[in-house]
Image (cartoon, rainbow, N blue to C red):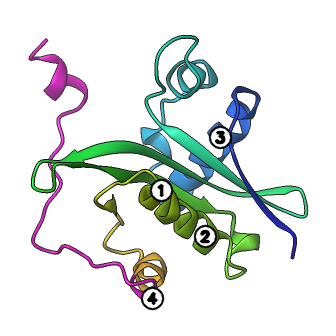
Amino acid sequence: MNLTIRDAAAADTPLILEFIRALADYEKLTAEVTADEAGLAATLFPPAGPPAAECRLAFVEGVPAGFAIYFTNYSTFLAKPGLHLEDLFVKPEFRGRGVGKALLLGLARLANERGYGRMEWTVLDWNQPAIAFYESLGAERLLDWQICRLTGSGLSRYA
């Protein structure tokens, strides 16, 4: 298998959006996707300043197979930045072939190269294949932590 992983470029914006929609479909969250190409391009590939997040794309035999979107977070306890993996998705026809593992471990190497203190991500509690995959790589699930979120009208009322 010829697997290639590379950093995304602005010209990849339509492909990134395709992956985001496929991930949302898999997670049964399609209705929550409001992202469009213009919004992605503006935040991932801004004309000035740092991007809000970074993206890596995986290709098998030149065919788009998966992606990972990640950004820097910060740990006050470690006094170090960390890497937050926002999305990891591999198309069904490419699963079980090492694509997800290559994306994830490539980001772990990147976190080490950048001197980050940790790498974190979330997984839906029903997604047993992903949980088993992450645990097989040595990831620890933090079951005592809960995600809290303000979004939409809940966030805008404090504008």
Residue at 43%, 50% (x, y): give it: 114
Q: Which of labels 2 and 1 is toward the front? A: 1
As measured in the structure, the alpha-carbon distance from the residue carrying label 3 to the one carrying label 4 is: 27 Å
Name the residue that disc number 1 marks. 113
Foreground: 156 or 146?
146
Name the residue that disc number 4 marks. 136
Foreground: 67 or 49?
49
Residue at 43%, 86% (x, y): give it: 132
Query: Magenta segment, which residues?
Result: 135-159
**Within the magenta stretch, is there residue 35?**
no
For the view shown, which residue lies furthest in the right direction? Answer: 61
Q: Is residue 121 visible?
A: no
Instruction: Give the answer, above or below, for where 137 lies relative to 66.
Output: below
Name the residue that disc number 2 marks. 100
- Image quarter in which the C terminus is found: top left
Instruction: Give the answer, above or below, for where 24 lies relative to 44.
Output: below
Q: Are marks 3 and 4 in contact (CB under 8 Å)?
A: no
Q: Does label 3 or label 1 sit earlier along the sequence? A: 3
The percent position of residue 102, horizontal first and vertical second, equals 63, 70
Is residue 22 found left or right of 113 in the rendered image?
right
